[in-house]
Image (cartoon, grey):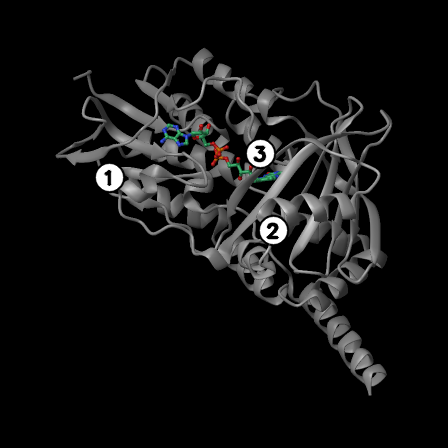
Amino acid sequence: MEDVWDLVVVGAGPAGSAAALGALRRRPGARVLVLDKADFPRDKACGDGIAAHGRDELARLGVPGLIDDYRPTPRLTVVSPGGTRVSATAARPNHVVPRRVFDARLVEAVRAAGGEVRRHRVRELAEAGPVVVIDGRIRARVVVAADGANSAVRRLIGLPVTPERHTAIAVRGYADVPDEDDVQLIAMQRAGWPAYAWSFPIGDGTANVGFGMLLPRLHATGLPGRQVLHGRLAELLPDRPARDLRAHHLPLSTGRPAPGAGRVLLAGDAASLINPLTGEGIYYALLSGRLAGEAASDAPGDPLPVYRRGLRAALGRHLRTTDVLARLAQSPGFIDAAIATAAHRKEVFDLLVEVGLGSGTVPVPLAYAVASRWLRDTVRHHRRGR
Ligand SMILES: Cc1cc2nc3c(=O)[nH]c(=O)nc-3n(C[C@H](O)[C@H](O)[C@H](O)COP(=O)(O)OP(=O)(O)OC[C@H]3O[C@@H](n4cnc5c(N)ncnc54)[C@H](O)[C@@H]3O)c2cc1C
Protein backbone atom coordinates (compact mmCIF):
# COMPACT_ATOMS: atom_id res chain seq x y z
CA MET A 1 0.00 0.00 0.00
CA GLU A 2 1.37 3.44 -1.00
CA ASP A 3 1.11 6.64 1.09
CA VAL A 4 -2.14 8.54 0.65
CA TRP A 5 -2.20 10.91 -2.34
CA ASP A 6 -4.05 14.21 -1.99
CA LEU A 7 -5.50 13.67 -5.44
CA VAL A 8 -5.44 10.81 -7.92
CA VAL A 9 -6.60 11.66 -11.42
CA VAL A 10 -7.66 8.83 -13.73
CA GLY A 11 -6.98 9.78 -17.37
CA ALA A 12 -4.42 12.26 -18.70
CA GLY A 13 -6.46 13.84 -21.50
CA PRO A 14 -7.32 17.55 -21.28
CA ALA A 15 -9.75 17.03 -18.37
CA GLY A 16 -7.27 14.99 -16.33
CA SER A 17 -4.29 17.28 -16.91
CA ALA A 18 -6.46 20.31 -16.13
CA ALA A 19 -7.57 18.68 -12.86
CA ALA A 20 -3.97 18.05 -11.84
CA LEU A 21 -2.84 21.56 -12.83
CA GLY A 22 -5.88 23.14 -11.13
CA ALA A 23 -5.08 21.34 -7.87
CA LEU A 24 -1.35 22.07 -8.04
CA ARG A 25 -1.91 25.74 -8.74
CA ARG A 26 -4.25 25.98 -5.78
CA ARG A 27 -1.82 24.14 -3.50
CA PRO A 28 1.74 23.84 -4.83
CA GLY A 29 3.42 20.86 -3.19
CA ALA A 30 0.20 18.83 -3.01
CA ARG A 31 0.71 15.10 -3.76
CA VAL A 32 -0.98 14.62 -7.12
CA LEU A 33 -0.81 11.40 -9.15
CA VAL A 34 -2.17 11.05 -12.70
CA LEU A 35 -2.82 7.54 -14.05
CA ASP A 36 -3.36 6.79 -17.74
CA LYS A 37 -3.57 3.46 -19.50
CA ALA A 38 -1.54 4.94 -22.39
CA ASP A 39 1.97 6.32 -22.68
CA PHE A 40 2.28 9.87 -24.04
CA PRO A 41 2.43 11.09 -26.75
CA ARG A 42 -0.67 9.14 -27.79
CA ASP A 43 -3.29 9.74 -30.50
CA LYS A 44 -6.95 10.43 -29.73
CA ALA A 45 -9.77 10.48 -32.30
CA CYS A 46 -10.74 14.16 -32.33
CA GLY A 47 -11.25 17.10 -34.68
CA ASP A 48 -8.28 18.77 -32.92
CA GLY A 49 -10.22 22.06 -32.88
CA ILE A 50 -9.42 24.18 -29.83
CA ALA A 51 -11.80 27.07 -29.37
CA ALA A 52 -10.68 30.48 -28.13
CA HIS A 53 -12.44 29.63 -24.86
CA GLY A 54 -10.16 26.62 -24.47
CA ARG A 55 -7.16 28.94 -24.74
CA ASP A 56 -8.63 31.09 -21.96
CA GLU A 57 -8.68 27.96 -19.82
CA LEU A 58 -5.04 27.22 -20.68
CA ALA A 59 -4.17 30.67 -19.36
CA ARG A 60 -6.10 29.96 -16.13
CA LEU A 61 -4.12 26.73 -15.77
CA GLY A 62 -0.84 28.64 -15.99
CA VAL A 63 0.11 27.50 -19.52
CA PRO A 64 -1.02 30.47 -21.65
CA GLY A 65 1.48 29.89 -24.46
CA LEU A 66 1.00 26.12 -24.79
CA ILE A 67 -0.20 26.26 -28.43
CA ASP A 68 1.19 29.62 -29.54
CA ASP A 69 3.37 27.97 -32.20
CA TYR A 70 0.22 26.83 -34.06
CA ARG A 71 -1.38 29.18 -36.57
CA PRO A 72 -4.70 30.67 -35.50
CA THR A 73 -7.63 29.87 -37.84
CA PRO A 74 -9.99 32.81 -37.58
CA ARG A 75 -12.18 32.08 -40.63
CA LEU A 76 -15.20 29.83 -40.42
CA THR A 77 -17.57 28.59 -43.12
CA VAL A 78 -20.77 26.76 -42.20
CA VAL A 79 -23.10 25.11 -44.71
CA SER A 80 -26.58 24.42 -43.29
CA PRO A 81 -28.51 21.16 -43.93
CA GLY A 82 -30.57 23.01 -46.58
CA GLY A 83 -27.43 24.39 -48.30
CA THR A 84 -27.29 27.95 -46.93
CA ARG A 85 -23.64 28.99 -46.62
CA VAL A 86 -22.25 31.53 -44.17
CA SER A 87 -18.58 32.57 -44.07
CA ALA A 88 -17.18 35.00 -41.53
CA THR A 89 -14.21 35.78 -39.39
CA ALA A 90 -14.80 34.62 -35.83
CA ALA A 91 -14.57 37.30 -33.12
CA ARG A 92 -11.68 35.30 -31.62
CA PRO A 93 -9.61 32.74 -33.57
CA ASN A 94 -9.70 29.00 -32.96
CA HIS A 95 -6.65 26.73 -33.19
CA VAL A 96 -6.17 23.26 -34.61
CA VAL A 97 -3.57 21.22 -32.76
CA PRO A 98 -3.23 17.44 -33.18
CA ARG A 99 -4.16 15.75 -29.93
CA ARG A 100 -0.95 13.75 -30.10
CA VAL A 101 0.84 17.05 -29.50
CA PHE A 102 -1.69 18.93 -27.35
CA ASP A 103 -2.26 16.21 -24.74
CA ALA A 104 1.46 15.39 -24.45
CA ARG A 105 2.24 19.06 -23.81
CA LEU A 106 -0.37 19.20 -21.07
CA VAL A 107 1.09 16.07 -19.47
CA GLU A 108 4.55 17.70 -19.52
CA ALA A 109 3.04 20.79 -17.86
CA VAL A 110 1.64 18.57 -15.09
CA ARG A 111 5.08 17.06 -14.51
CA ALA A 112 6.69 20.50 -14.51
CA ALA A 113 4.17 21.65 -11.89
CA GLY A 114 5.18 18.75 -9.60
CA GLY A 115 2.58 16.10 -10.45
CA GLU A 116 3.51 12.46 -11.02
CA VAL A 117 2.22 10.81 -14.21
CA ARG A 118 2.20 7.01 -14.36
CA ARG A 119 1.09 4.44 -16.91
CA HIS A 120 -1.64 2.38 -15.25
CA ARG A 121 -5.08 1.14 -16.32
CA VAL A 122 -7.62 1.57 -13.49
CA ARG A 123 -9.89 -1.44 -12.97
CA GLU A 124 -11.18 -1.28 -9.39
CA LEU A 125 -12.22 1.38 -6.94
CA ALA A 126 -13.41 1.14 -3.33
CA GLU A 127 -14.26 3.78 -0.72
CA ALA A 128 -12.57 2.99 2.60
CA GLY A 129 -13.52 5.64 5.19
CA PRO A 130 -11.71 8.90 4.39
CA VAL A 131 -9.88 7.49 1.35
CA VAL A 132 -10.60 5.87 -1.99
CA VAL A 133 -8.53 2.78 -2.79
CA ILE A 134 -7.67 2.17 -6.45
CA ASP A 135 -6.80 -1.33 -7.60
CA GLY A 136 -6.21 -2.42 -4.01
CA ARG A 137 -3.06 -0.34 -3.47
CA ILE A 138 -3.26 3.33 -4.51
CA ARG A 139 -4.98 5.47 -1.87
CA ALA A 140 -6.39 8.96 -2.50
CA ARG A 141 -8.27 11.57 -0.50
CA VAL A 142 -10.05 12.59 -3.71
CA VAL A 143 -10.27 10.96 -7.16
CA VAL A 144 -11.01 12.86 -10.36
CA ALA A 145 -12.28 10.53 -13.07
CA ALA A 146 -11.25 11.98 -16.41
CA ASP A 147 -11.12 8.66 -18.23
CA GLY A 148 -13.13 9.72 -21.24
CA ALA A 149 -16.21 8.64 -23.14
CA ASN A 150 -16.24 5.02 -21.94
CA SER A 151 -15.32 5.93 -18.36
CA ALA A 152 -14.61 2.83 -16.30
CA VAL A 153 -14.70 4.86 -13.09
CA ARG A 154 -18.18 6.18 -13.87
CA ARG A 155 -19.37 2.57 -14.11
CA LEU A 156 -17.47 1.54 -10.98
CA ILE A 157 -19.21 4.20 -8.86
CA GLY A 158 -22.60 3.07 -10.16
CA LEU A 159 -23.58 6.04 -12.32
CA PRO A 160 -25.46 5.15 -15.51
CA VAL A 161 -23.75 5.55 -18.88
CA THR A 162 -24.94 8.28 -21.27
CA PRO A 163 -28.18 7.15 -22.98
CA GLU A 164 -27.80 6.19 -26.63
CA ARG A 165 -30.08 9.03 -27.80
CA HIS A 166 -27.54 11.47 -26.31
CA THR A 167 -24.51 9.75 -27.83
CA ALA A 168 -22.87 10.62 -31.14
CA ILE A 169 -20.18 8.81 -33.08
CA ALA A 170 -17.60 10.46 -35.32
CA VAL A 171 -14.69 9.44 -37.48
CA ARG A 172 -11.67 11.63 -38.10
CA GLY A 173 -8.71 11.44 -40.48
CA TYR A 174 -6.03 13.66 -41.99
CA ALA A 175 -5.98 15.01 -45.56
CA ASP A 176 -3.61 17.14 -47.64
CA VAL A 177 -4.72 20.73 -48.23
CA PRO A 178 -2.94 23.82 -49.60
CA ASP A 179 -0.66 25.44 -47.00
CA GLU A 180 -2.62 28.67 -47.26
CA ASP A 181 -5.99 27.02 -46.43
CA ASP A 182 -7.05 28.68 -43.18
CA VAL A 183 -10.82 28.19 -43.20
CA GLN A 184 -12.56 25.89 -40.74
CA LEU A 185 -15.36 24.30 -42.74
CA ILE A 186 -18.46 22.65 -41.31
CA ALA A 187 -20.73 21.04 -43.92
CA MET A 188 -24.02 19.76 -42.50
CA GLN A 189 -26.06 17.00 -44.09
CA ARG A 190 -29.85 16.61 -44.19
CA ALA A 191 -29.68 12.80 -44.61
CA GLY A 192 -29.62 11.21 -41.15
CA TRP A 193 -29.69 14.68 -39.59
CA PRO A 194 -28.14 15.81 -37.22
CA ALA A 195 -24.92 14.99 -39.09
CA TYR A 196 -21.98 17.00 -40.38
CA ALA A 197 -18.51 16.81 -41.89
CA TRP A 198 -15.65 19.13 -41.01
CA SER A 199 -12.28 20.21 -42.36
CA PHE A 200 -10.00 21.93 -39.87
CA PRO A 201 -6.64 22.96 -41.45
CA ILE A 202 -3.70 22.69 -39.10
CA GLY A 203 -1.42 25.10 -40.97
CA ASP A 204 1.18 22.56 -42.12
CA GLY A 205 -0.43 21.47 -45.40
CA THR A 206 -2.76 18.99 -43.69
CA ALA A 207 -6.27 19.26 -42.28
CA ASN A 208 -8.14 17.22 -39.74
CA VAL A 209 -11.25 16.01 -41.59
CA GLY A 210 -14.14 14.02 -40.20
CA PHE A 211 -17.81 13.17 -40.09
CA GLY A 212 -20.13 12.66 -37.12
CA MET A 213 -23.76 11.77 -36.46
CA LEU A 214 -26.05 10.62 -33.63
CA LEU A 215 -25.66 6.94 -32.75
CA PRO A 216 -29.39 6.06 -33.13
CA ARG A 217 -29.35 7.58 -36.64
CA LEU A 218 -26.35 5.44 -37.55
CA HIS A 219 -28.05 2.30 -36.22
CA ALA A 220 -31.23 3.23 -38.16
CA THR A 221 -29.32 2.87 -41.44
CA GLY A 222 -28.90 -0.86 -40.73
CA LEU A 223 -25.44 -0.64 -42.36
CA PRO A 224 -22.01 -1.27 -40.84
CA GLY A 225 -20.76 1.84 -39.01
CA ARG A 226 -17.52 2.03 -40.96
CA GLN A 227 -19.35 1.99 -44.28
CA VAL A 228 -21.67 4.84 -43.26
CA LEU A 229 -19.10 7.07 -41.55
CA HIS A 230 -16.30 6.63 -44.10
CA GLY A 231 -18.78 6.83 -47.00
CA ARG A 232 -20.44 10.05 -45.86
CA LEU A 233 -17.07 11.68 -45.18
CA ALA A 234 -15.89 10.88 -48.70
CA GLU A 235 -19.20 12.09 -50.15
CA LEU A 236 -19.18 15.43 -48.28
CA LEU A 237 -15.47 16.19 -48.75
CA PRO A 238 -14.67 14.51 -52.10
CA ASP A 239 -11.56 16.66 -52.69
CA ARG A 240 -9.96 15.63 -49.36
CA PRO A 241 -9.32 11.88 -49.27
CA ALA A 242 -8.51 11.02 -45.66
CA ARG A 243 -5.90 8.69 -44.12
CA ASP A 244 -5.48 7.47 -40.50
CA LEU A 245 -9.26 7.18 -40.04
CA ARG A 246 -10.26 6.56 -36.45
CA ALA A 247 -13.71 6.72 -34.79
CA HIS A 248 -14.90 7.27 -31.23
CA HIS A 249 -18.11 7.90 -29.27
CA LEU A 250 -19.12 11.36 -28.02
CA PRO A 251 -21.25 11.38 -24.84
CA LEU A 252 -23.26 14.57 -25.37
CA SER A 253 -24.43 16.87 -22.62
CA THR A 254 -28.03 16.32 -21.54
CA GLY A 255 -28.11 19.72 -19.81
CA ARG A 256 -27.46 18.12 -16.40
CA PRO A 257 -23.90 16.81 -15.99
CA ALA A 258 -23.19 13.87 -13.66
CA PRO A 259 -20.62 15.44 -11.29
CA GLY A 260 -19.72 12.22 -9.41
CA ALA A 261 -20.37 10.54 -6.07
CA GLY A 262 -18.71 10.93 -2.65
CA ARG A 263 -15.00 11.56 -3.08
CA VAL A 264 -15.02 10.76 -6.79
CA LEU A 265 -15.57 13.68 -9.19
CA LEU A 266 -16.22 13.20 -12.91
CA ALA A 267 -14.81 15.64 -15.48
CA GLY A 268 -14.81 16.06 -19.26
CA ASP A 269 -16.26 13.23 -21.36
CA ALA A 270 -16.57 11.03 -18.26
CA ALA A 271 -19.22 13.55 -17.09
CA SER A 272 -20.87 13.61 -20.58
CA LEU A 273 -19.67 17.15 -21.12
CA ILE A 274 -19.74 17.54 -24.89
CA ASN A 275 -21.66 20.31 -26.62
CA PRO A 276 -24.68 18.56 -28.24
CA LEU A 277 -24.80 21.14 -31.05
CA THR A 278 -21.19 20.97 -32.21
CA GLY A 279 -19.43 18.01 -30.57
CA GLU A 280 -16.99 20.43 -28.91
CA GLY A 281 -15.59 18.93 -25.71
CA ILE A 282 -12.04 20.17 -25.14
CA TYR A 283 -13.10 23.49 -23.62
CA TYR A 284 -15.56 21.77 -21.26
CA ALA A 285 -12.87 19.17 -20.40
CA LEU A 286 -10.32 21.86 -19.46
CA LEU A 287 -12.90 23.88 -17.52
CA SER A 288 -14.51 20.97 -15.64
CA GLY A 289 -11.11 19.40 -14.96
CA ARG A 290 -9.82 22.64 -13.46
CA LEU A 291 -12.93 23.06 -11.29
CA ALA A 292 -12.68 19.45 -10.08
CA GLY A 293 -8.98 19.88 -9.21
CA GLU A 294 -9.70 23.12 -7.35
CA ALA A 295 -12.57 21.48 -5.41
CA ALA A 296 -10.25 18.60 -4.45
CA SER A 297 -7.79 21.15 -3.03
CA ASP A 298 -10.31 23.44 -1.37
CA ALA A 299 -12.55 20.81 0.23
CA PRO A 300 -10.70 17.47 0.41
CA GLY A 301 -13.14 16.13 3.03
CA ASP A 302 -16.26 16.79 0.94
CA PRO A 303 -15.37 18.01 -2.55
CA LEU A 304 -18.57 17.11 -4.43
CA PRO A 305 -20.82 20.03 -3.32
CA VAL A 306 -18.02 22.52 -4.10
CA TYR A 307 -17.49 20.99 -7.53
CA ARG A 308 -21.21 20.85 -8.29
CA ARG A 309 -21.57 24.54 -7.38
CA GLY A 310 -18.58 25.50 -9.51
CA LEU A 311 -19.92 23.64 -12.53
CA ARG A 312 -23.36 25.15 -12.11
CA ALA A 313 -21.96 28.69 -11.85
CA ALA A 314 -19.69 28.26 -14.90
CA LEU A 315 -21.91 26.25 -17.23
CA GLY A 316 -25.40 25.80 -15.73
CA ARG A 317 -27.36 28.25 -17.90
CA HIS A 318 -25.29 27.44 -20.96
CA LEU A 319 -25.88 23.68 -20.67
CA ARG A 320 -29.63 24.21 -20.25
CA THR A 321 -29.54 26.45 -23.35
CA THR A 322 -27.71 23.89 -25.49
CA ASP A 323 -30.11 21.18 -24.30
CA VAL A 324 -33.14 23.18 -25.49
CA LEU A 325 -31.39 24.12 -28.75
CA ALA A 326 -30.37 20.51 -29.40
CA ARG A 327 -34.05 19.50 -29.15
CA LEU A 328 -35.07 22.27 -31.56
CA ALA A 329 -32.17 21.35 -33.85
CA GLN A 330 -33.69 17.91 -34.39
CA SER A 331 -35.54 19.82 -37.10
CA PRO A 332 -33.03 20.77 -39.83
CA GLY A 333 -35.29 23.74 -40.66
CA PHE A 334 -34.40 25.32 -37.31
CA ILE A 335 -30.68 25.16 -38.08
CA ASP A 336 -31.32 26.45 -41.62
CA ALA A 337 -33.13 29.45 -40.09
CA ALA A 338 -30.36 30.08 -37.53
CA ILE A 339 -27.64 29.97 -40.20
CA ALA A 340 -29.64 32.08 -42.64
CA THR A 341 -30.04 34.70 -39.90
CA ALA A 342 -26.30 34.55 -39.14
CA ALA A 343 -25.50 34.97 -42.85
CA HIS A 344 -26.64 38.58 -42.83
CA ARG A 345 -26.15 39.53 -39.17
CA LYS A 346 -22.58 39.23 -37.88
CA GLU A 347 -23.64 39.66 -34.24
CA VAL A 348 -25.85 36.56 -34.63
CA PHE A 349 -22.93 34.63 -36.13
CA ASP A 350 -20.78 35.60 -33.13
CA LEU A 351 -23.49 34.58 -30.67
CA LEU A 352 -23.90 31.20 -32.35
CA VAL A 353 -20.14 30.63 -32.07
CA GLU A 354 -20.35 31.49 -28.35
CA VAL A 355 -23.11 28.90 -27.86
CA GLY A 356 -21.47 26.25 -30.05
CA LEU A 357 -17.88 26.57 -28.85
CA GLY A 358 -17.99 28.47 -25.56
CA SER A 359 -20.39 28.97 -22.68
CA GLY A 360 -22.81 31.41 -24.34
CA THR A 361 -26.56 31.59 -23.92
CA VAL A 362 -29.23 32.87 -26.29
CA PRO A 363 -30.54 36.41 -25.72
CA VAL A 364 -34.31 36.82 -26.28
CA PRO A 365 -34.00 39.02 -29.42
CA LEU A 366 -31.85 36.37 -31.11
CA ALA A 367 -34.31 33.61 -30.20
CA TYR A 368 -37.09 35.77 -31.62
CA ALA A 369 -35.22 36.51 -34.87
CA VAL A 370 -34.43 32.84 -35.52
CA ALA A 371 -37.88 31.57 -34.48
CA SER A 372 -39.70 34.05 -36.74
CA ARG A 373 -37.49 33.13 -39.69
CA TRP A 374 -38.03 29.42 -39.02
CA LEU A 375 -41.80 29.99 -38.91
CA ARG A 376 -41.72 32.05 -42.14
CA ASP A 377 -39.64 29.37 -43.92
CA THR A 378 -41.93 26.60 -42.65
CA VAL A 379 -45.09 28.41 -43.86
CA ARG A 380 -43.47 29.15 -47.25
CA HIS A 381 -42.39 25.52 -47.59
CA HIS A 382 -45.92 24.37 -46.72
CA ARG A 383 -47.55 26.68 -49.28
CA ARG A 384 -45.17 25.50 -52.01
CA GLY A 385 -46.07 21.90 -51.14
CA ARG A 386 -49.82 22.54 -51.63
C1 LIG B 1 -14.05 12.23 -33.91
C2 LIG B 1 -14.17 13.28 -32.82
C3 LIG B 1 -13.94 14.62 -33.12
C4 LIG B 1 -13.98 15.58 -32.11
N1 LIG B 1 -13.63 16.87 -32.42
C5 LIG B 1 -13.52 17.79 -31.46
C6 LIG B 1 -13.01 19.09 -31.74
O1 LIG B 1 -12.60 19.40 -32.88
N2 LIG B 1 -12.94 19.99 -30.73
C7 LIG B 1 -13.35 19.68 -29.46
O2 LIG B 1 -13.28 20.54 -28.59
N3 LIG B 1 -13.79 18.44 -29.16
C8 LIG B 1 -13.87 17.48 -30.10
N4 LIG B 1 -14.26 16.21 -29.78
C9 LIG B 1 -14.52 15.89 -28.37
C10 LIG B 1 -13.18 15.73 -27.59
O3 LIG B 1 -12.36 14.81 -28.26
C11 LIG B 1 -13.44 15.24 -26.16
O4 LIG B 1 -14.49 16.00 -25.60
C12 LIG B 1 -12.17 15.40 -25.29
O5 LIG B 1 -11.17 14.54 -25.72
C13 LIG B 1 -12.50 15.10 -23.82
O6 LIG B 1 -11.32 15.08 -23.07
P1 LIG B 1 -11.21 14.14 -21.78
O7 LIG B 1 -9.94 14.51 -21.12
O8 LIG B 1 -12.48 14.18 -21.01
O9 LIG B 1 -11.14 12.63 -22.36
P2 LIG B 1 -10.03 11.97 -23.32
O10 LIG B 1 -9.36 12.98 -24.12
O11 LIG B 1 -10.74 10.85 -24.00
O12 LIG B 1 -8.95 11.35 -22.31
C14 LIG B 1 -9.26 10.24 -21.50
C15 LIG B 1 -7.96 9.57 -21.09
O13 LIG B 1 -8.28 8.54 -20.13
C16 LIG B 1 -7.46 7.42 -20.38
N5 LIG B 1 -8.16 6.24 -19.82
C17 LIG B 1 -9.32 5.70 -20.24
N6 LIG B 1 -9.67 4.67 -19.45
C18 LIG B 1 -8.71 4.56 -18.50
C19 LIG B 1 -8.51 3.70 -17.39
N7 LIG B 1 -9.39 2.73 -17.07
N8 LIG B 1 -7.41 3.86 -16.62
C20 LIG B 1 -6.51 4.85 -16.91
N9 LIG B 1 -6.66 5.69 -17.97
C21 LIG B 1 -7.74 5.55 -18.72
C22 LIG B 1 -7.29 7.38 -21.90
O14 LIG B 1 -6.12 6.68 -22.28
C23 LIG B 1 -7.22 8.88 -22.22
O15 LIG B 1 -5.89 9.33 -22.27
C24 LIG B 1 -14.28 15.22 -30.76
C25 LIG B 1 -14.54 13.87 -30.47
C26 LIG B 1 -14.47 12.90 -31.47
C27 LIG B 1 -14.72 11.47 -31.12
Q: Amino acid at mark 3?
A: Ala
Give neighbour class at mark 3: few <14, some 14-19, many 20+ (Cα, 10 Å).
some
- Measured as percent of width and height from the top left, residue 4 is found at 21, 20
Quadrant showing the N terminus = top left
Ligand 1 near label 3 (Cβ, under 8 Å)?
A: yes
Q: Residue furthest bottom?
A: 386
Circle 3/circle 1 CB separation < 8 Å: no
Give the image location of residue 39, x and y in percent. Answer: 46, 17
Q: Residue at x 19, y 16 (%)?
A: 3
Q: Residue at x 49, y 49 (%)?
A: 315
Please indicate whether residue 366 sits to the left or right of residue 156 in the image.
Answer: right
Q: Vertical placement of 91 versus 346: above or below?
A: above
Q: Position of residue 48 (x, y in %)?
A: 64, 32
Name the residue beneath numbered marker 2: 360
Q: CA distance from mark 3 to mark 2?
A: 26 Å
Decide which of tag 1 and tag 2 comes sooner along the chain.
1
Q: Secondary structure at mark 3?
A: loop
- Mark 2 nearby-residue class (10 Å; few <14, some 14–19, many ≥20): some
Q: Disc 2 residue type?
A: Gly
Q: Quarter-wise, where is residue 82 in the image? A: bottom right
Q: Amino acid at mark 1?
A: Asp
Q: Which residue is mark 3?
A: 45
**Mark closest to the chain's N terminus, 3 or 2:** 3
Left or right: where 228 falls relative to 187 = left
Residue bearing the label numbered 1: 302
Q: Can the viewer see residue 358?
A: no
Q: Secondary structure at mark 1?
A: loop
Q: Is residue 48 left or right of residue 234?
A: left
Residue at coordinates 84% horizontally, 38% vertically from top-left?
239
